Image: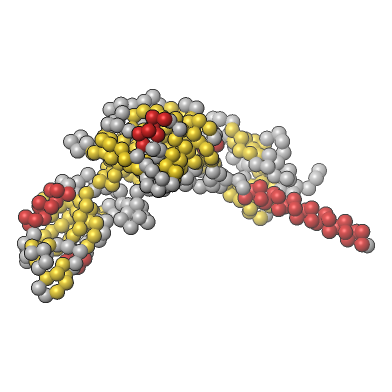
Amino acid sequence: MKKSFARGLVLSLLLILLVAQGIQALLLLPREVTRFEGDEQSISFDLPWPIKISDNGGILQAVDDVGKGYILNAKSGNYSFTFSLLGLLPLKQMQVNVIPHLDLVPSGHSIGVKLADTGVIIAGLDSIMTSAGKREPAKDSGFQVGDILIAVNGIELKNLGHAAIVLEELSQPGTELECQVIRQSKKIYLPITPVYDVEAKRPRLGLLLRDTAAGVGTMTFYHEETGYFGALGHMITDENGGMAADLSSGWIVEASIVSIRPGKQGKPGEKQGTFVEDSQPMGAIKKNTELGIFGKLSRKPQTELEPMPLGLKHEVKAGKAQILTVIEGDKVELYDIKIEKLFLQNKPASKGMVIKITDPKLLSATGGIVQGMSGSPIIQDGKIVGAVTHVFINEPQRGYGCFAEWMVLESGLLTEIESYAPPKFLEAIFMLFLPKN
């Protein structure tokens, strides 16, 4: 009896261990993977049990080594698979994005980001000291921080300097002004009456304004046929630094680098650039996400490189790579880097790899990664595999990069490509612990 009990206990423990190993293997599987249409590419996993695949869509083919994975053979679309224990208990879901082979034009061009083509940003709402006490005319009129003031009494505001002149001329005590504002993609009209500031000794509205320029960054890529572009590799946040800035009226413009403040330990460097004000905007921004800004070009950069294939994240490896960026004027150059570490990511995120600048010329000019370099495309083995996103504050030679695959999936580009099929939903049940024949 004791021997039977001991034998049963050992078998039970082995079974529990086997189950635990399998569940752990499932949990380590990525939640989302991308593969190219037409390629017989395996998606591998390592389970301790044999599996049987129920696949009505006919897109899966088990590999010869049972329990090690499957080969995907599908048209473009989005597919969802459920891993279930004995076909009853769902343990894991995986989304597979099958996309057409993509050739993208690597950029590296410096761009200026403007939250709107015209107007000024409401950066704050000020109180005003009057003879009757403090007043807050801007707040009382319904203005909010982040609003874009585009016109006053029908006069379009071109920039910050022009807005200051117009508001000074029109602001008279007791005279109501009609302000046209963009808020969350909608135009609204707000009336406001200036009050006399006894401290400043002039009429004021209580509006604190700033230019619509959000800074200088780098374009990562664009698609030649559709004109879709991706840039920055990270989100542009609002005044409080926590939420995505409203870029529904945003544009990108050409920028020229005039100087560089090199990065030092504890103090990030910066590309200092000027917007080419006289030129027409290069493109409209459609999305502002954790992976960068995306939109559609109205015209291409004056200098362009040959298109390159998109490299998926499973193709990226630690080792030598290069980036494209500008350190003077508008000249895009190629510089050496090293990909030091890759992170296993189950969902899109801006920190997918650790990179280190190794190029002597770039280190001499910038000290490493500097502000304004975000979005510089990372090239490896003739493919666009990522973009520079962040710098290590205390080690400016090193920083983070994101995967180009995530940027493409976030961009909206795939929906614009003719060969991209409408999304599908397909569920494949993986039967575990099958009884022996």
Question: Hey, which quadrant is residue 63 in on the image?
Answer: top right
Question: Hey, which quadrant is residue 42 in on the image?
Answer: top right
Question: Hey, which quadrant is residue 203 in on the image?
Answer: bottom left
The residue drawn where x is 62% and y is 41% is 56
- Coloured how? secondary structure
Residue closest to the far bottom: 132
The answer to whether 318 appears left or right of 432 in the picture is left
Q: Is residue 176 visible?
A: no
The residue drawn where x is 40% and y is 48% is 266
Question: Residue 389's spot in the image, x, y percent?
Answer: 41, 42
Question: Residue 338's spot in the image, x, y percent?
Answer: 49, 34
Circle count? 0
The answer to whether 246 appears left or right of 411 in the picture is left
The residue drawn where x is 63% and y is 53% is 91
Question: Residue 19's spot in the image, x, y percent?
Answer: 72, 52
Specify the quadrant that holds the N terminus: bottom right
The residue drawn where x is 27% and y is 56% is 146
Q: Nearer the viewer, residue 374 or 26?
A: 374
Relative to 136, residue 296 above or below:
above
Q: Is residue 279 visible?
A: yes
Q: Nearer the viewer, residue 376 or 106?
A: 376
Specify the quadrant that holds the C terminus: top right
Question: Residue 125's spot in the image, x, y percent?
Answer: 22, 62
